Image: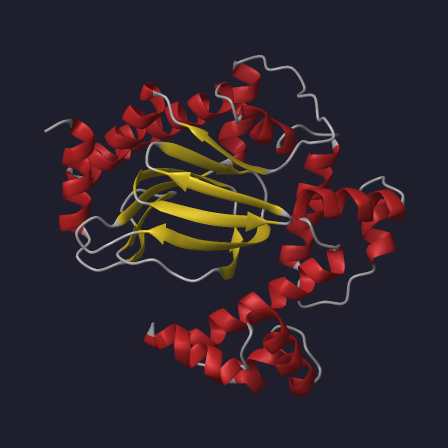
Amino acid sequence: MNRLEQIKEKIIKLYNEPGYYNTSIKGFKISKREEPSELKKCFYTPLAILLLQGSKQTIFGDREFTFGAGQYIVCSVDIPLMSRIKDATKENPCIGLVVELDSYLISQLMTEMELIEPECNKNQTCFAGADADEDLINAFIRLAELLEQPEGKQKILAPMILKEIHYLLLSGPLGNLIKAANTKGNQYNQIAGAINLLKENYKEKINMDELAKSLNLATSSFYRHFKKVTTISPLQYQKQLRLYEAQRLMISGEHNAESASYLVGYESPTQFSREYKKMFGNPPKTDIKNLVNA
Protein backbone atom coordinates (compact mmCIF):
# COMPACT_ATOMS: atom_id res chain seq x y z
CA MET A 1 0.00 0.00 0.00
CA ASN A 2 1.48 3.39 -1.02
CA ARG A 3 1.54 6.47 1.22
CA LEU A 4 -1.48 8.03 -0.48
CA GLU A 5 -3.63 4.99 0.24
CA GLN A 6 -2.27 4.84 3.80
CA ILE A 7 -3.14 8.45 4.57
CA LYS A 8 -6.64 8.00 3.14
CA GLU A 9 -7.18 5.01 5.44
CA LYS A 10 -5.82 6.94 8.43
CA ILE A 11 -8.15 9.88 7.78
CA ILE A 12 -11.16 7.60 7.41
CA LYS A 13 -10.34 5.99 10.77
CA LEU A 14 -9.41 9.26 12.48
CA TYR A 15 -12.64 10.98 11.43
CA ASN A 16 -15.40 8.40 11.78
CA GLU A 17 -18.27 10.66 10.76
CA PRO A 18 -18.59 12.87 7.67
CA GLY A 19 -17.88 16.55 8.27
CA TYR A 20 -15.55 19.50 7.94
CA TYR A 21 -12.98 19.33 10.71
CA ASN A 22 -10.49 21.71 12.25
CA THR A 23 -7.31 19.82 13.11
CA SER A 24 -4.69 20.25 15.81
CA ILE A 25 -2.56 22.07 13.20
CA LYS A 26 -3.58 25.71 12.82
CA GLY A 27 -4.70 26.53 9.30
CA PHE A 28 -5.18 22.88 8.31
CA LYS A 29 -8.61 21.28 7.92
CA ILE A 30 -10.02 17.96 6.75
CA SER A 31 -13.16 17.50 4.68
CA LYS A 32 -14.78 14.07 4.60
CA ARG A 33 -18.13 13.45 2.84
CA GLU A 34 -19.83 10.09 2.37
CA GLU A 35 -22.55 10.88 -0.16
CA PRO A 36 -23.24 13.26 -3.04
CA SER A 37 -24.91 16.55 -2.15
CA GLU A 38 -27.02 19.17 -3.87
CA LEU A 39 -25.54 22.45 -5.07
CA LYS A 40 -25.40 24.87 -2.15
CA LYS A 41 -24.41 28.50 -1.89
CA CYS A 42 -21.35 29.03 0.25
CA PHE A 43 -18.40 31.35 0.88
CA TYR A 44 -14.84 30.30 0.14
CA THR A 45 -12.05 32.02 2.04
CA PRO A 46 -8.46 32.11 0.69
CA LEU A 47 -7.43 28.45 0.68
CA ALA A 48 -5.98 25.53 -1.21
CA ILE A 49 -7.73 22.14 -1.30
CA LEU A 50 -6.09 18.89 -2.38
CA LEU A 51 -8.62 16.18 -3.25
CA LEU A 52 -7.40 12.74 -2.23
CA GLN A 53 -10.56 10.89 -3.24
CA GLY A 54 -13.96 11.57 -4.77
CA SER A 55 -14.95 14.63 -6.76
CA LYS A 56 -16.75 17.94 -6.34
CA GLN A 57 -18.48 20.41 -8.61
CA THR A 58 -18.25 24.16 -8.20
CA ILE A 59 -20.00 27.03 -9.99
CA PHE A 60 -18.37 30.44 -9.79
CA GLY A 61 -20.25 33.09 -11.73
CA ASP A 62 -20.88 31.61 -15.17
CA ARG A 63 -18.01 29.13 -14.90
CA GLU A 64 -18.49 25.50 -13.91
CA PHE A 65 -15.67 23.32 -12.58
CA THR A 66 -15.38 19.64 -11.68
CA PHE A 67 -12.39 18.56 -9.59
CA GLY A 68 -11.30 14.99 -8.90
CA ALA A 69 -8.72 13.01 -6.96
CA GLY A 70 -5.17 14.22 -7.51
CA GLN A 71 -6.26 17.75 -8.34
CA TYR A 72 -6.07 20.88 -6.21
CA ILE A 73 -8.13 24.04 -5.97
CA VAL A 74 -6.91 27.54 -5.16
CA CYS A 75 -9.13 30.40 -4.02
CA SER A 76 -7.19 33.65 -3.47
CA VAL A 77 -9.90 35.96 -2.03
CA ASP A 78 -13.18 35.56 -0.13
CA ILE A 79 -15.85 34.77 -2.73
CA PRO A 80 -19.41 33.45 -2.87
CA LEU A 81 -20.01 30.43 -5.08
CA MET A 82 -22.03 27.23 -5.36
CA SER A 83 -20.55 23.83 -4.60
CA ARG A 84 -21.54 20.21 -4.20
CA ILE A 85 -20.00 16.82 -3.59
CA LYS A 86 -20.34 14.88 -6.83
CA ASP A 87 -18.74 11.51 -6.13
CA ALA A 88 -18.69 10.00 -2.61
CA THR A 89 -19.81 6.84 -0.82
CA LYS A 90 -19.41 5.50 2.69
CA GLU A 91 -16.84 3.00 1.43
CA ASN A 92 -15.01 5.62 -0.69
CA PRO A 93 -15.68 9.03 0.84
CA CYS A 94 -14.72 12.29 -0.79
CA ILE A 95 -11.63 13.45 1.13
CA GLY A 96 -10.09 16.89 0.88
CA LEU A 97 -7.05 18.33 2.65
CA VAL A 98 -7.50 22.07 3.16
CA VAL A 99 -4.79 24.64 3.87
CA GLU A 100 -5.79 28.23 4.64
CA LEU A 101 -3.65 30.67 2.69
CA ASP A 102 -1.54 32.85 4.98
CA SER A 103 -1.10 36.36 3.51
CA TYR A 104 1.89 37.13 5.74
CA LEU A 105 3.66 33.94 4.70
CA ILE A 106 2.83 34.60 1.05
CA SER A 107 4.31 38.12 1.22
CA GLN A 108 7.42 36.76 2.93
CA LEU A 109 7.89 34.06 0.29
CA MET A 110 7.29 36.47 -2.58
CA THR A 111 10.15 38.61 -1.25
CA GLU A 112 12.44 35.63 -0.71
CA MET A 113 11.62 34.24 -4.15
CA GLU A 114 12.09 37.69 -5.73
CA LEU A 115 8.85 37.26 -7.62
CA ILE A 116 8.03 39.97 -10.12
CA GLU A 117 4.60 41.56 -10.20
CA PRO A 118 2.16 39.17 -11.90
CA GLU A 119 0.54 40.09 -15.17
CA CYS A 120 -3.25 40.28 -14.71
CA ASN A 121 -4.82 39.46 -18.05
CA LYS A 122 -8.49 39.94 -18.85
CA ASN A 123 -9.21 36.26 -18.11
CA GLN A 124 -7.46 36.36 -14.73
CA THR A 125 -9.61 34.86 -11.99
CA CYS A 126 -9.30 34.30 -8.25
CA PHE A 127 -10.51 30.69 -8.35
CA ALA A 128 -9.18 27.74 -10.35
CA GLY A 129 -7.93 24.15 -10.18
CA ALA A 130 -5.08 22.10 -11.62
CA ASP A 131 -3.44 18.69 -11.44
CA ALA A 132 -1.21 18.40 -8.36
CA ASP A 133 2.37 17.32 -8.93
CA GLU A 134 4.19 14.77 -6.79
CA ASP A 135 5.93 17.40 -4.63
CA LEU A 136 2.68 19.12 -3.67
CA ILE A 137 0.89 15.83 -2.93
CA ASN A 138 3.79 14.65 -0.77
CA ALA A 139 3.85 17.92 1.18
CA PHE A 140 0.11 17.66 1.93
CA ILE A 141 0.53 14.00 2.94
CA ARG A 142 3.40 14.83 5.31
CA LEU A 143 1.24 17.52 6.91
CA ALA A 144 -1.62 15.04 7.38
CA GLU A 145 0.75 12.42 8.80
CA LEU A 146 1.75 14.91 11.51
CA LEU A 147 -1.77 14.65 12.98
CA GLU A 148 -0.72 11.35 14.60
CA GLN A 149 2.45 12.87 16.06
CA PRO A 150 2.89 14.49 19.51
CA GLU A 151 1.99 18.17 19.87
CA GLY A 152 5.64 19.15 20.32
CA LYS A 153 6.58 17.61 16.99
CA GLN A 154 3.62 19.26 15.27
CA LYS A 155 4.62 22.63 16.70
CA ILE A 156 8.07 22.42 15.12
CA LEU A 157 7.40 20.66 11.83
CA ALA A 158 3.94 21.94 10.79
CA PRO A 159 5.08 25.54 10.11
CA MET A 160 7.93 24.20 7.94
CA ILE A 161 5.59 22.03 5.87
CA LEU A 162 2.99 24.81 5.59
CA LYS A 163 5.68 27.15 4.28
CA GLU A 164 6.74 24.48 1.78
CA ILE A 165 3.13 24.08 0.60
CA HIS A 166 2.79 27.85 0.15
CA TYR A 167 6.05 27.87 -1.81
CA LEU A 168 4.88 25.05 -4.08
CA LEU A 169 1.55 26.79 -4.64
CA LEU A 170 3.25 30.07 -5.53
CA SER A 171 5.66 28.38 -7.94
CA GLY A 172 2.98 26.13 -9.46
CA PRO A 173 0.54 26.69 -12.35
CA LEU A 174 -1.96 28.56 -10.14
CA GLY A 175 0.64 30.72 -8.45
CA ASN A 176 -0.42 33.82 -10.38
CA LEU A 177 -3.83 33.75 -8.65
CA ILE A 178 -2.16 33.96 -5.25
CA LYS A 179 0.47 36.50 -6.31
CA ALA A 180 -2.13 38.84 -7.84
CA ALA A 181 -4.20 38.98 -4.65
CA ASN A 182 -1.09 39.68 -2.56
CA THR A 183 0.74 42.21 -4.75
CA LYS A 184 0.04 45.75 -3.59
CA GLY A 185 -1.29 48.17 -6.16
CA ASN A 186 -2.97 45.85 -8.63
CA GLN A 187 -6.72 45.54 -8.96
CA TYR A 188 -6.95 42.11 -7.31
CA ASN A 189 -5.13 43.31 -4.22
CA GLN A 190 -7.27 46.47 -4.13
CA ILE A 191 -10.44 44.40 -4.26
CA ALA A 192 -9.05 42.03 -1.61
CA GLY A 193 -8.62 45.13 0.58
CA ALA A 194 -12.21 46.20 -0.11
CA ILE A 195 -13.42 42.70 0.77
CA ASN A 196 -11.60 42.86 4.12
CA LEU A 197 -13.25 46.20 4.89
CA LEU A 198 -16.68 44.82 3.97
CA LYS A 199 -16.09 41.77 6.17
CA GLU A 200 -15.05 43.92 9.13
CA ASN A 201 -18.01 46.29 8.72
CA TYR A 202 -20.72 44.12 7.19
CA LYS A 203 -23.31 45.28 9.76
CA GLU A 204 -22.85 48.95 8.90
CA LYS A 205 -24.20 51.06 6.07
CA ILE A 206 -21.19 51.62 3.85
CA ASN A 207 -20.82 54.44 1.36
CA MET A 208 -19.43 52.61 -1.66
CA ASP A 209 -18.23 55.87 -3.25
CA GLU A 210 -16.10 56.54 -0.17
CA LEU A 211 -14.85 52.95 -0.18
CA ALA A 212 -13.81 53.31 -3.82
CA LYS A 213 -12.08 56.60 -3.03
CA SER A 214 -10.12 54.97 -0.17
CA LEU A 215 -8.75 52.49 -2.73
CA ASN A 216 -7.81 55.29 -5.16
CA LEU A 217 -10.36 54.00 -7.65
CA ALA A 218 -13.13 55.77 -9.52
CA THR A 219 -16.53 54.42 -8.43
CA SER A 220 -17.22 52.93 -11.88
CA SER A 221 -13.80 51.21 -11.92
CA PHE A 222 -14.32 49.93 -8.38
CA TYR A 223 -17.67 48.34 -9.26
CA ARG A 224 -16.27 46.86 -12.48
CA HIS A 225 -13.18 45.38 -10.82
CA PHE A 226 -15.17 44.12 -7.82
CA LYS A 227 -17.64 42.25 -10.02
CA LYS A 228 -14.81 40.85 -12.15
CA VAL A 229 -13.14 39.36 -9.06
CA THR A 230 -16.22 38.21 -7.10
CA THR A 231 -18.92 37.99 -9.88
CA ILE A 232 -21.27 40.20 -7.81
CA SER A 233 -21.50 43.88 -6.84
CA PRO A 234 -20.14 45.26 -3.53
CA LEU A 235 -23.69 45.78 -2.22
CA GLN A 236 -24.67 42.20 -3.09
CA TYR A 237 -21.48 40.99 -1.46
CA GLN A 238 -22.25 42.80 1.79
CA LYS A 239 -25.81 41.45 1.74
CA GLN A 240 -24.54 37.90 1.34
CA LEU A 241 -22.07 38.37 4.20
CA ARG A 242 -24.97 39.40 6.43
CA LEU A 243 -27.14 36.47 5.38
CA TYR A 244 -24.38 33.87 5.86
CA GLU A 245 -23.57 35.27 9.30
CA ALA A 246 -27.27 35.20 10.23
CA GLN A 247 -27.43 31.59 9.07
CA ARG A 248 -24.43 30.74 11.26
CA LEU A 249 -26.04 32.43 14.28
CA MET A 250 -29.29 30.50 13.81
CA ILE A 251 -27.52 27.17 13.31
CA SER A 252 -25.80 27.73 16.67
CA GLY A 253 -29.26 27.52 18.27
CA GLU A 254 -28.77 30.74 20.23
CA HIS A 255 -30.79 32.99 17.92
CA ASN A 256 -34.03 32.91 15.96
CA ALA A 257 -34.59 34.72 12.66
CA GLU A 258 -35.65 38.00 14.31
CA SER A 259 -32.72 38.33 16.71
CA ALA A 260 -30.22 37.17 14.07
CA SER A 261 -31.53 39.73 11.58
CA TYR A 262 -30.94 42.62 13.99
CA LEU A 263 -27.48 41.34 14.92
CA VAL A 264 -26.29 41.35 11.31
CA GLY A 265 -27.58 44.84 10.56
CA TYR A 266 -31.13 44.45 9.27
CA GLU A 267 -33.74 46.93 10.52
CA SER A 268 -36.69 44.81 9.37
CA PRO A 269 -37.03 41.07 10.15
CA THR A 270 -39.58 40.87 7.33
CA GLN A 271 -37.08 42.19 4.80
CA PHE A 272 -34.46 39.82 6.22
CA SER A 273 -36.73 36.77 5.82
CA ARG A 274 -37.61 37.81 2.27
CA GLU A 275 -33.96 38.22 1.25
CA TYR A 276 -32.94 35.05 3.09
CA LYS A 277 -35.53 32.98 1.19
CA LYS A 278 -34.45 34.55 -2.11
CA MET A 279 -30.85 33.56 -1.48
CA PHE A 280 -31.17 30.14 0.17
CA GLY A 281 -34.46 28.94 -1.33
CA ASN A 282 -36.33 28.49 1.96
CA PRO A 283 -37.51 30.74 4.81
CA PRO A 284 -34.98 30.92 7.70
CA LYS A 285 -36.80 28.50 10.01
CA THR A 286 -37.20 25.82 7.31
CA ASP A 287 -33.65 26.23 6.02
CA ILE A 288 -32.05 25.97 9.46
CA LYS A 289 -34.15 22.90 10.30
CA ASN A 290 -32.96 21.22 7.08
CA LEU A 291 -29.32 22.13 7.73
CA VAL A 292 -29.35 20.94 11.35
CA ASN A 293 -30.99 17.65 10.41
CA ALA A 294 -28.80 17.04 7.35
Q: Nearer the viewer, residue 73 or 167?
A: 73
Q: Nearer the viewer, residue 153 or 97?
A: 97
Report which quarter residue 122 is drawn in: top right
Q: Nearer the viewer, residue 293 or 190?
A: 293
Q: Is residue 181 above or below residue 112?
A: below
Q: Residue at x 60, y 75 (%)?
A: 276
Q: Is residue 76 above or below residue 89?
A: above
Left or right of 131 on screen, residue 247: right
Left or right of 233 on screen, residue 172: left
Image mark count = 0
Q: Residue at x 70, y 29 (%)?
A: 184
The image position of residue 134, as x and y in percent, is 31, 20
The image position of residue 119, as x and y in percent, is 70, 21
Q: Is residue 251 above or below residue 76?
A: below
* Residue 156 makes an appearance in the image: no
Report which quarter residue 124 is drawn in: top right
The image position of residue 45, as x and y in percent, is 52, 48
Q: Residue furthest top?
A: 114
The quadrant in which the C terminus is found is bottom left
Q: Residue at x 64, y 29 (%)?
A: 180
The image position of residue 162, as x and y in percent, is 37, 30
